Image (cartoon, rainbow, N blue to C red):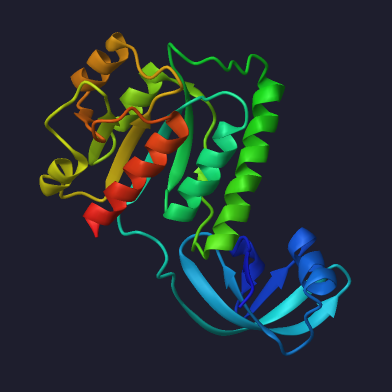
Amino acid sequence: MPRFFVSPQNIKNENIIVSGEDAKHIKTVLRMREGESLTVCDGCGMDYECSINSFVDKEILLDIVSKSNSVSEPETKITLFQGLPKADKMELIIQKCVELGIDEIVPVYTERCIVKLDKKDKEAKKIERWQKISESAAKQSGRGKIPTIKPVINFKEAVEISKNFDGAIIPYENEKDRGIREFVKDFHGKTVAMFIGPEGGFSTDEINLSVEKGVLPVTLGKRILRTETAGLSALSILLYELG
């Protein structure tokens, strides 16, 4: 069944209004008609099963048939603090992490980042594009929310923010003993911060700072993974171990 997202403000009593590109897609691409069914999400974890009531100008009026909590959202909310990679790797990371179940993504400047978004307008355009990729991946994978892509921050700011989470991990090639399974065994919270370095990994100073702030180094195995592989692997393992 087709699936779309709307703002909670577009949900009124027993009806939902769909507008913009989604309305155009429903009408001209899917060629749906009055009485046909589709699923709408409010972006906050609630799903609405609807039927098309009518087409009015550039909007579509839907009747709510039923509503329920989305079953596709993980109970534990995981935030990825991703060291900025070069080229289009960030787009791949966002797309796949959203499909897997990430809650939000925070791009991070680290010592070994090659990419620099020097101008605010350039950064804003990047964030806007990344957010659209997140939305598209959320629709495709049946998510109950669209994960937010936050503004870029530096590493020091990121580890400070991580103190607000119930737990935080940082995959590190020199960690030999603690894996994600060991972290999960001692974890009893609802939010996790996960740090992934850029192509060159994290510096020793960054690892030391993260440990000082309570972030736990973990191993992902005996092989060195690319930045776009490390995050997907760590997220998959974490979600699996959390059940």
Q: Quadrant of residue 114?
A: top right
Q: Residue at x 34, y 49 (%)?
A: 236
Q: Residue furthest right?
A: 57
Q: Position of residue 67 (x, y in %)?
A: 49, 79
Would residue 171 appear left or right of 97 to someone viewing this image? left
Q: Residue at x 45, y 23 (%)?
A: 198
Q: How many marks?
A: 0
Q: Residue at x 66, y 38 (%)?
A: 128
Kindly tell me whether residue 14 is visible in this rendering: no
Q: Quadrant of residue 7?
A: bottom right
Q: Position of residue 200 (x, y in %)?
A: 42, 17
Image position of 82 with respect to 50: above or below: above
Position of the N terminus by quadrant: bottom right
Position of the C terminus by quadrant: bottom left
Q: Quadrant of residue 212?
A: top left
Q: Residue furthest bottom?
A: 35
Q: Position of residue 94 (x, y in %)?
A: 53, 42
Q: Position of residue 22 (x, y in %)?
A: 74, 63
Q: Nearer the viewer, residue 15 or 77?
A: 77
Q: Nearer the viewer, residue 102 or 237?
A: 237
Image position of 195 with respect to 241: above or below: above
Would residue 224 appear left or right of 92 to someone viewing this image? left
Kindly tell me whether residue 116 is visible in this rendering: yes
